[in-house]
Amino acid sequence: MNKIFTVLIAILAIIPAICSAAPQNDEKKQFFKEIREFKHKFLARELSLTKDQEQKFFPIYDQMEDETDKLQEETRELENKVRESSEPSDLEYEKATDAIFELKMKEGEIENSYLEKFRTVLNNKQLFNLKNAERNFNRDLMKQHNRLRQKKNKNQ
């Protein structure tokens, strides 16, 4: 498992290069596909999903994540547009600020709209543990990233 995290963190270290180079758009897509597959394996293990549950759960889960990702992207685009504008108007600042502050609420609304769909696949214990499993995934990812960064700094 540590090897997987190490490889994943190594990939994370190159995100800026991947994201900044337009011709490498396919690499960026491949990277996020690999992250998603890794997250699937992690959640399946953490939630003790059966193969049948995995086949039913992850398409629903991915659809939810796609919706929240789209919302986050739209919010970042609006924020960047205002930030990069030479003289944004008060209305532009207001709209961007509203979008930023409403982001978590809207993400919660999206997630809540999927609750009943998740209940058709997951048992109550699995559903209860889902958010904790997501936090564990993010926490483990950050730990590995920090370890890799510390190791890199020692080698410089």
Image (cartoon, rainbow, N blue to C red):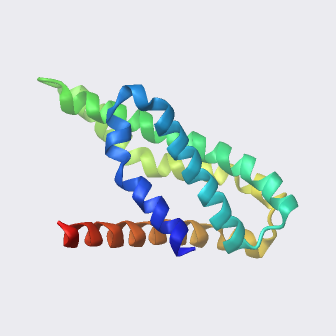
Observer-nearest of 93 and 79: 79
Give residue 96's position: percent from left, percent from top: 30, 35
- Picture quarter with the C terminus: bottom left
Q: Is residue 40 above or below residue 84?
A: below
Q: Is residue 33 above or below residue 37?
A: above
Res 63 → quadrant: top right
Q: Is residue 98 visible?
A: yes
Picture residue at 29% right of the left edge, 35% below the top: 79
Give residue 29's position: percent from left, percent from top: 52, 37
Give residue 90's position: percent from left, percent from top: 18, 29
Furthest residue in direction front, as rendered: 155
Q: How many marks?
A: 0
Furthest residue in direction right, as rendered: 52
Picture residue at 79% right of the left edge, 58% below the top: 54
Furthest residue in direction left, as rendered: 87
Q: Is residue 149 above or below residue 59?
A: below
Picture residue at 82% right of the left edge, 52% below the top: 56
Picture residue at 63% right of the left edge, 53% below the top: 37
In this rendering, would 81 be left or right of 48? left
In this rendering, would 138 be left or right of 148? right
In this rendering, would 121 be left or right of 40? right
Observer-nearest of 115 and 126: 126
In this rendering, would 135 be left or right of 24? right
Give residue 110's position: percent from left, percent from top: 60, 47
Q: Is residue 70 visible?
A: no
Observer-nearest of 137 and 152: 152
Q: Is residue 15 above or below residue 29?
A: below
- Picture quarter with the N terminus: bottom right
